[in-house]
């Protein structure tokens, strides 16, 4: 192995996305050796304080996307996912909302949501 090869998993030149669960300890130094042009998404739990600290970073700040756990599902950009792997791959599920509280929980910062009546 040559000196310029990084054996750390996050440092892989082929890494496309990272999903960080809960309040995991995440530092930018974990990405040493990563090709930032190939790294498209860093999915972070909204409870992850470390991810918020990296939002202003020029190389990775725009790649951070925050998700939230809601019951046994995950929410990203007001869309529901059954698992973290579905979230990373974009395989969303449809969720019926029955109460105002459920609607407010997924409505985003300005309490905006769409309602479709059937």
Image: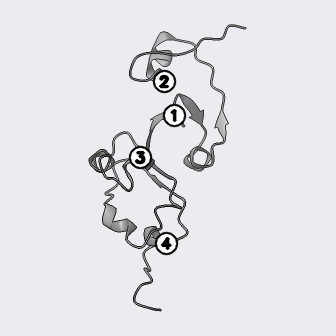
Residue shown at 61% from the left, 39% from the top: 82
Question: Dot 4, crowdedness within 10 Å: few (<14), some or many (≥20)?
Answer: some
At mark 3, the secondary structure is helix
What's the CA distance linking mark 2 and mark 4? 34 Å
- Quick one: label 4 or label 3, which is nearer the N terminus? 4
Here the colouring is: one colour
What's the CA distance linking mark 4 and mark 3? 19 Å
- Quick one: label 3 or label 2, which is nearer the N terminus? 3
Figure quadrant of residue 91: top right
What's the CA distance linking mark 3 and mark 2? 22 Å
Front one among 97 and 34: 34
At mark 2, the secondary structure is loop
Of all residues shown, which one is farthest toward the bottom?
Answer: 1
Disc number at residue 75? 1
Residue shown at 42% from the left, 75% from the top: 8
Label pair 3/2, CB-CB below 8 angstroms:
no
Q: Nearer the viewer, mark 4 or mark 1?
A: 4
Question: Dot 1, crowdedness within 10 Å: few (<14), some or many (≥20)?
Answer: many
What's the CA distance linking mark 3 and mark 1? 19 Å
- Quick one: label 4 or label 1, which is nearer the N terminus? 4
Residue that mark 3 sits on: 62
- Quick one: label 2 or label 4, which is nearer the N terminus? 4
Q: Is residue 1 above or below residue 97?
A: below
Residue shown at 49% from the left, 72% from the top: 12
Q: Is residue 37 above or below residue 50?
A: below
What's the CA distance linking mark 1 and mark 2? 7 Å
Q: Is residue 56 left or right of residue 46?
A: left
Residue that mark 4 sits on: 12
Residue that mark 2 sits on: 106
Q: Nearer the viewer, mark 3 or mark 1?
A: 3
């Amino acid at each position: 192995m040559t000196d310029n090869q990084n054996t750390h998993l996050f440092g892989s030149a082929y890494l496309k996305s990272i999903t960080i669960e809960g309040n995991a300890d995440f530092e930018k130094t974990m990405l040493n050796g990563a090709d930032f042009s190939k790294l498209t998404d860093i999915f972070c739990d909204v409870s992850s304080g470390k991810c918020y600290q990296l939002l202003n970073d020029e190389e990775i700040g725009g790649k951070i996307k925050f998700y939230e756990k809601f019951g046994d599902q995950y929410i990203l950009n007001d869309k529901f996912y059954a698992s973290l792997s579905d979230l990373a791959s974009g395989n969303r599920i449809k969720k019926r909302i029955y109460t105002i509280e459920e609607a407010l929980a997924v409505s985003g910062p300005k309490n905006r949501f769409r309602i479709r009546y059937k």
